[in-house]
Image (tube, rainbow, N blue to C red):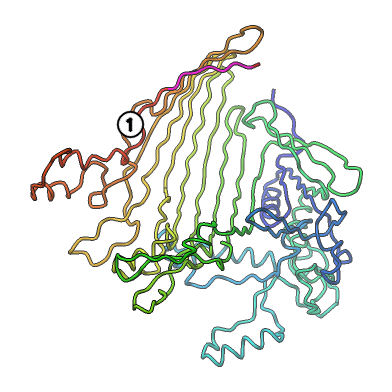
Amino acid sequence: MTPSYDYDYIVIGSGFGGSVAALRLAEKGYRVLILEKGKWFTAQDFPKRNWNVKKWLWIPFLRFYGFFKISFFRHITILSGVGVGGGSLVYANTLPLPRKEFFTAEGWAHLADWESELAKHYQTASKMLGTVPNPSLETGDIALQKLAREIGKADQFKPTEVAVFFGEPDVTVPDPYFDGKGPERAGCNFCGGCMTGCRYNAKNTLDKNYLHLAQQLGTKIQAEAEVYDVRPLQSPDGKQGYRVKWKKSTGIFRKKGEITARGIIHFSYGHFFQIPNFELLYRNPQFKLETSGGTNRGIIGNSDLTPQQTISGEIGLQQQIGSDIVIDGTIFFRDIRDLAGTRADEIPLISGETYSRLVNSDFGFVKGFIISVRNRFSTGFNYTADYTFQIAKGTASDPNQARNAVAGGALPEVQVTPLGWDQRHTLNGTLGYNRPTWGISFIGRLGSGQPYTPRQGADVATIRENSQTKPTFWTVDSRVFKDFRLFQRRFSIFLRVFNLFDTLNEVNVYNDTGRAGFTTDLERNRASNPPQNVNTIDEWYVNITHYSEPRRIEFGFIFDF
């Protein structure tokens, strides 16, 4: 029996991702609910300055119900917005269009003409958020403009693009953006309070565009509702929808409720800061350098390394199709900055030799998408399949990479190349059959090889880092179990087989051939006729670490008591 739902989609959070998703779903006729943990702020609710911490910060246990949240973790501090409109309430509303260099960056330029591909989407976002050049140059802008002229870069200076209504200061007018469908607005008076909440109805926060228009199409926004549990209805894989439980996030008496929905929009976005490993901060604290091995004598740590910065986000849609199938699609990205590396000037010694020091010199990015399908039949059969496409590129996979290049006599170049763990294509699948007391399942994996750097030959001037890929791998695992009742307790025996078909996957390769079991060094060394006292030359070049683990069988039992 198919359950009835309160809404077609429930969107948790009302920031940029949630607001856009809610409006576009509402435009397609879906019933949408937005649950927002923070309050619904009006212009009068914002503080005049951030010293008014009770109105500014979100710290519920102190009864501070502001809109700015600071989350402290061991190595990461996260700054976020809380309230209807999410981060748009606290961000500086500057929305510059990337320059051509961004669209033609080496890491993704070959995939598409991104400048033309994304142009219409930038135009849509700019229109929705009301982006215009700042008409007033203040002290800081004038100083930058003067500096640009002094260094011969006057043509590079431009006023910032901001999401603000610049009408007549403090004068309220009908909606100037959406043909009268939006709320009344007032002209900016340049108070400078964008990041402490606009008190004059001039900042184009999400509650004045995406969320306002979504409401007109029937979307409901429930503020001060913190989601604390999401559970699938009837079937464990969510095919029959979800039950979302929430509780009131403000006040002393916390009202609770629950709502059902057929589909789920999931998204996340955050800025993360991570302290470098202590090994990098305090490496070689006695400053003991190598006594041989070239002119560069080694690496020392750097206690002044700044935290690495990561901007991470994803957005996805899970949708039930028919009574048995659930499809989930997710797009994700990570932009990683200030990674520790040795891409800096070598430090000279009195002897004329040098050493390297770790600095924040490297960066990387990851982007891709995941598509998954799940199906569970009433007869006991079930299957899942998911495909991941991922691009992971950066300036170095290893903090020591630039120094190692110098030590090897090469000049390190700043190039964006595939990272050592980059895997473009991954396909996973499961097939199972389960009954109340026994079951059998299979898990299969198929993936493209990770990159490696080929050996530089005498006829090749230079080789790009990680420019070749290792062979494709695949494997299948299996599990069988049988349950019994013994002394009124559950007794279960199981058999697990890893690498069922004993596949010999090549996980490491010789850098001259790209294969695990063949290298041209073998013939070259045979020609030199070296002594073979313990191992033959052929045995010397058989490296078991180049291959994946062979078939492994585990048998065991579980007894619950």
- Where's the C terminus, which quadrant? top right
Q: Is residue 78 above or below residue 375?
A: below
Location of mark 1 (residue): 503
Q: Nearer the viewer, residue 511 or 278?
A: 278
Percent coordinates x, y for residue 98 in the rendering: 55, 70
Q: Is residue 344 above or below residue 484?
A: below
Q: Residue farthest to the bottom?
A: 150
Percent coordinates x, y for residue 375 in the rendering: 55, 28
**Left or right for 157, reference 26:** left
Q: Nearer the viewer, residue 45 or 523?
A: 523
**Left or right for 109, reference 532:** right
Q: Is residue 489 above or below residue 30?
A: above
Classify mark 1: residues with Cα within 10 Å, few (<14), some (14-19) or many (20+). some
Quadrant of res 553: top left
Q: Nearer the viewer, residue 385 or 341?
A: 341
**Left or right for 138, reference 545:** right
SS assignment at label 1: loop
Percent coordinates x, y for residue 333 in the rendering: 54, 54
Q: Is residue 526 above or below residue 42?
A: above
Secondary structure character of the magenta stretch overall: strand
Residue ID at (91%, 46%): 252
Quadrant of res 226: top right
Magenta segment, which residues?
Answer: 554-560
Residue ID at (67%, 58%): 77
Residue ID at (87%, 61%): 54
Q: Nearer the viewer, residue 274 or 380?
A: 274
Identify the amino acid type marked 1: Thr
Percent coordinates x, y for residue 283 in the rendering: 48, 61
- Whether residue 246 is in magenta: the answer is no
- Where's the N terminus, which quadrant? top right
Residue ID at (67%, 75%): 132
- Whether residue 557 is in magenta: the answer is yes
